Image (cartoon, helix red, strand yellow):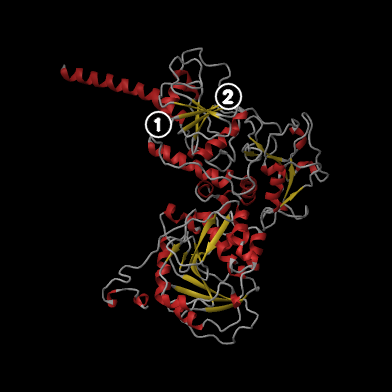
Amino acid sequence: MQSWRRKSLWLALSASWLLVLLRVFPLLRLAVPGGPWASAPQGWPRWLDAELLQSFSPPGELPEDALQLPHAPRGGSCNWEACFDVSKCGAGGLKVFVHPVAGPLSAAHRRILASIESSRYHSASPDEACLLLFLSLEVPAGECSPLPQQWNGGRNHLVLGLHPAPCPQNFQLGQAMVAKASPTVDTFRPGFDVALPLLPEAHPLRGGAPGQLRQHSPHPGVPLLALAEERGGWRTAGTDPSVCPWDGRCEQDRGPEKTHPEGALPNATFCLIPGHHPDALHFLQALQAGCIPVLLSPRWELPFSEVIDWTKAAIVADKRLPLQVLAALQEMPPTRVLALRQQTQFLWDAYFSSVEKVVHTTLEIIQDRIFGASAHPSLLWNSPPGALLALPIFSTSPSDFPFYYLQLGSHPVGRFSALIWVGAPGQPPLKLIQAVAGSQHCAQILVLWSSEKPPPPRWPETAVPLTVMDGQRKVSDRFVPHRAISTDAILSLDAHSSLTTSEVDFAFLVWQSFPERMVGFLTWNHFWDEAQGSWGYTAERANEFSMVLTSAAFYHRYYHTLFTHTLPKALRTLADEAPTCVDILMNFLVAAVTKLPPIKVPYGKQHLEARPPLVPGGREPPPAARDCINQMAAGFGYMPLVSSRLRLDPVLFKDPVSVLRKKYRSLEKP
């Protein structure tokens, strides 16, 4: 009898716990969206448990406009296969021609045009272009911008509008794709249109302001919630989870509140954003602030929802369930909060911080459709540094890029290729070749001959293959992705460089531990000159540095592809005109990708005494060279260099022990 009673009590307790779980876990699935469906475009996470909403509200409390499936969009018969001719796109990738704009241009539209014309996608001829771009301008209410003459029913056209367009006649667009700010889910065509973010008028052309997240977890007293207001500002509420700041039916005390003016970014953990279209601007503000966006039943499409997995950075909640949603946010694990906040900072910096990044992301999405989904796997879009810096012309596999080794749990193996640039007239670098060829990690030596003097007919015999290539008499020629390079690691050298085999061996082992960075011997440092109000740099030896000279440095060969295909032509021309600028430009590029400083390794004093002048031939640097760091900072839109005081030395280096016990013995030489 007692056994039967214990079993009955156990069944009753189990049933009670089951009822509790059924009431709690559906809410968590509503508040924190799950992963995107692999077979469907990644839009707003849809309510998978809509039938359970009644269990959280009394009968008749829910409004009549309950969640419904989206209506079929206008022009819904158009899709990628039916309305875009891929055959016009050659093997070179996406080429874009911009139709001439009739009428005056605003400053915002000039920034859009400048970002396209300076990109690798731009084409000056409509016959060579794969995509024809029509810029949607602001016109009087109820009117539409006149369509260009070469419209062709909108086929292979993209109508671009970063700002809300007043033209309501979308049916005139025909077979054209539409890329506009915050489209509604009723009119958006997944897989064909592109959802853009709603940008402010003064959004910067390139670079942009960095993210505002300064700590990984909120300090005591930091508000839990910030609510977007209709006038453009924010209102922060206290940390009490029992308040419902957006629902007037709550009888509880709202707690201490503080109103922030328009444009001010809140210091809060969660940013509650209503689902109205004007609230889309608050979404970008929350991303920049590192405040996790909590979208209350939105009806506008998420920016770049086709490629970005927003479940890693945002939360979709139901505004009809204020108390349950607030309780779920309060109980969210700190690890989950940290992951969401970090992802907001990455997405802001990679795709939204400037007009240039927004436009390039739009074009890169269309290019992915041309090449197929394998052009940019989801990992490349949703992990730093992002798809804009992981070019498919180099590879479509994350394992081939230097910045994904850690995420994939691997490290670079193999050996390196030594690329020796010979620019100034002089003797061939025979001693340097012998020192590099003696390294056990050297796979090949490539001599890039860019001197006006012809190369010698005979070269010394080495244990590794030696190849002489003709250069184009440009300093930046060393950063071309030469097909002869057969390894991931490159040791960039000048003919006047002086290294020992031990120094080369140790530097390569250091680079294998940090394959995304530059590892070098000679360093420079940048600084801000308050008197001049500009940037400067110095080559004097100091503890702090932010650049390593490419005359003796290891880096991944992928940076040659980025240097050639992503940098503006104006910056590459500047580097060719002022040879000292090429080192600064390469360091700018790597720092912009990694957000990390280079690494310094030991360099013998005997090399410093024979160090050549900074400019081949001993000439004084031209004015462009002295100011190149400011021109490059303007070209990037910000200063990407990061200072460091770290130098890696081998174990027992310069320790008072026997030299025979040390692996790199030649480093001990004075």
Q: Which residue is mark 2?
A: 68
Percent x, y for residue 26? 43, 26
- Observer-side mark, 2 or 1, equals 1
Identify which residue, 19 or 113, lies in the foreground. Answer: 113
Percent x, y for residue 533? 58, 53
Residue at screen point 41% across, 25% down = 327
**Vertical position of residue 157 compared to residue 70: above or below:** below
**Vertical position of residue 614 compared to residue 410: above or below:** below
Residue type at mark 2: give it: Gln
Q: Residues within 10 Å of mark 2 (few under 14, many from 20)?
A: few
Percent x, y for residue 275? 57, 27
Identify which residue, 355 or 55, lies in the foreground. Answer: 355
On screen, residue 337 versus residue 588, left or right, reads left
Identify which residue, 521 or 280, lies in the foreground. Answer: 521
Residue type at mark 1: give it: Gly
Residue 412 lies in what quarter of the image?
bottom left
Mark 2 in CB contact with mark 1 (< 8 angstroms): no
Percent x, y for residue 52? 46, 22
The answer to whether one can see residue 536 in this image is yes
Q: Secondary structure at mark 2?
A: loop
Q: Which residue is mark 1?
A: 221
Residue at screen point 36% across, 25% down = 21
Q: Secondary structure at mark 1?
A: loop
Residue 473 lies in what quarter of the image?
bottom right
Identify which residue, 649 or 511, lies in the foreground. Answer: 649
Q: Residues within 10 Å of mark 1 (few under 14, many from 20)?
A: few
